[in-house]
Amino acid sequence: MKTIKRDLVIIGGGPAGLSAAVSARQNGCDDVLIIERDRILGGILNQCIHDGFGLHRFGEALTGPEYAQRYIDEYEKMKGDVMLGTIVLNMDANRNLLVSSRKGFTKIEARAIILAMGCRERTAGAISLPGTRPAGVYTAGAAQNFINLQNIMVGKRVVIMGSGDIGLIMARRMTLEGAKVEGVFELLPYSSGLPRNIQQCLMDYDIPLHLSTSVVKIHGKERLTGVTVACMDEKFQPIPGTERDVPCDTLLLSVGLIPENELSRGAQVAIEPRTNGASVDDTLMTSIPGVFSCGNVLHVHDLADSVSEESALAGQFAVSYLGGNITPPVKKVPIQPGDGVRYVLPQAVSGQRDFTLSLRVASPSRNRIVTVKDGEKEVARKKIVRLHPAEMIHLKVKAEKIPESGKLEVSVA
Ligand SMILES: Cc1cc2nc3c(=O)[nH]c(=O)nc-3n(C[C@H](O)[C@H](O)[C@H](O)COP(=O)(O)OP(=O)(O)OC[C@H]3O[C@@H](n4cnc5c(N)ncnc54)[C@H](O)[C@@H]3O)c2cc1C
C-alpha cells in the first residue's frame, strides 16, 4: 500500500472542510489536503437549493450550492489540493489515516487533521417507530436529495414527523412541487426548527404545525397508507383517546441529526455526550493533539454561516499547531452548562486567548440574561430578548477573565 505524508488533512469537503481549508491556506499552510467521499465538494449544501444561506457571512441570500461555490472558487484560486471520491476508512491516535478510492487503499501520515465529516439524520429505526415498514417513509434529507438532485418526486400526500429545519424546508418544497402536506407533528411543546422557518415554510403556506403531538404508528403493507398520531403528555407518552388516523402515502422524518463521529471514536477521541461531538478546547483541538474538529460533526449548527466562521478558526489553529505556536496549555478550565443550558462549547479553555462560547438553551423563553460565572464571580454576560433551543447563542469571553483554576458555569437567569 502506498504511504504519503501531509501537513494538514481535512476530512470532509462540506462548508466546514472548505472554510477550514481556505483559512489554513490564508494562514500560511501550503500543504492542505481535503478528502471528500462524494464526487463534488459542497457537502449537504448541494441539495439545499432554497435561499437563505450567507446572510451573515456575505450579506446576501444565497442558495446552498451558491454558498458552497464561493468557498470552492476561493480554494481553487489557491490551487488547493482535493481527493474526491475518496473515503477515510480509519484514523488512529497518531494521525494516520487509511483512505480508499478507485485507485485502491492509501495510508496518509498527517501532522494535523481537521475533522469536518458533518452529520446524518435519525431514521425510523433510530427512533423505534412502531408499525409496518412500507415504502414511502423517508428522512427529510433523503427526500430532499431525491427531489432536488435526482428529480424524483417522492409522494403526493405527506405527513412530516418532527419540526427540525430540514422537515420545515421540505414541507414547503413538497407543497411547491404539488403535494398536499397534511401537517407537521412535533413531540415537544415547541418547534425544534428556527422561528424564521416556521413563518416562511409553514405559516406562509397554511401548513398546520401540531405541537405536543407525534406519530405513534405507521400503516401500510407495500406502500404507506397512513399514520396514527396522538397528543403527548409531559412525559412524551401518548394520551389515551387522542389517537387519530391521518391518511398519507409519504412520511418524512425530521427527528434530529447525529454527528458522524465513527472515525473519531475509532481513534479514541473523547466525545461529549451532550453534543455527540468531540470534546474541544478553545483552539477547537480534541483530546488528541493535532486533531481539530468543526462544523456539524462537532455540534449541530443552526446556520451554515456559523459553520464557516467556526471552521475558519479550526483552520487557523491547526496552522498555529503546525508552526509550534499552540503549546499544551498550562491550565485547562472546564466549562459546564448550568440552569437552562443544554450544552456549551468549548468544554475547556486555557486562558491564553479570548474565545467565543457557543451554547444552546434547554427551552424557549424571553428577556433573559446568559451569564458565565467563576463561582459567584461573573465573567461574561449577554442579555437576550428571545431564546430558543433551535437558535445557537454566541458569547465572547475575555482571556483575562478566565480563572487560574476551578470551573466556569454558564446559565440562563
Ligand atoms: C439533510 C440535511 C439538510 C440540511 N438542510 C439545511 C438547510 O436547508 N439550511 C441550512 O441552513 N442548513 C441545512 N442543513 C444543515 C447544514 O448541513 C449545515 O449547516 C452544514 O452543511 C454543515 O456543514 P458540514 O461541512 O459540517 O457538514 P456537511 O455539509 O454534511 O459536509 C460533510 C462532508 O463530509 C464528507 N464526509 C463524511 N465522512 C467522510 C469520510 N469518512 N471520508 C470522506 N468524506 C467524508 C461528506 O460526504 C460531506 O460532504 C442540512 C443538513 C442536513 C443533514
Image (cartoon, grey):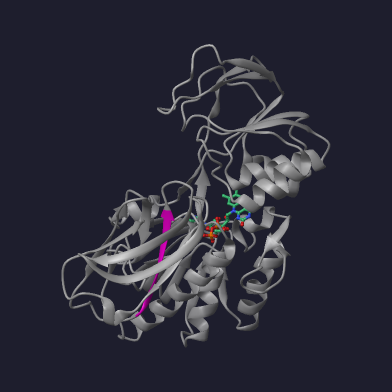
Q: Residue most toward the right?
A: 178
x 25%, y 81%: residue: 327
State the quadrant of the N terminus.
bottom left
Q: Nearer the viewer, residue 217 or 339?
A: 339
x 55%, y 27%: residue: 214
x 62%, y 73%: residue: 57
Q: Nearer the viewer, residue 255 or 21?
A: 255
Picture layout, residue 67 above or below residue 250: below
Picture layout, residue 217 above or below residue 262: above
Total of numbered circles in the picture? 0
State the quadrant of the C terminus.
bottom left
Image location (x, y in percent) of residue 267: 31, 57
Image location (x, y in percent) of residue 64: 68, 60
Image location (x, y in percent) of residue 319: 40, 81
The quadrant where ligand 1 appears is bottom right
Residue 8 appears in the figure: yes
Picture layout, residue 265 above or below residue 155: below
Relative side of 190 to 248, left or right: left
Q: Quadrant of residue 286?
A: bottom left
Relative side of 75 to 411, left or right: right
Relative side of 83 to 11, left or right: right
Q: Residue most toward the front?
A: 367
What secondary structure do most residues of the magenta stretch adopt?
strand
- Boundaries of the magenta span: 354-360
Q: Quadrant of residue 174?
A: top right
Residue 157, magenta (yes or no): no
Image location (x, y in percent) of residue 266: 32, 52
Q: Nearer the viewer, residue 47 or 35?
A: 47
Residue 88 appears in the figure: no
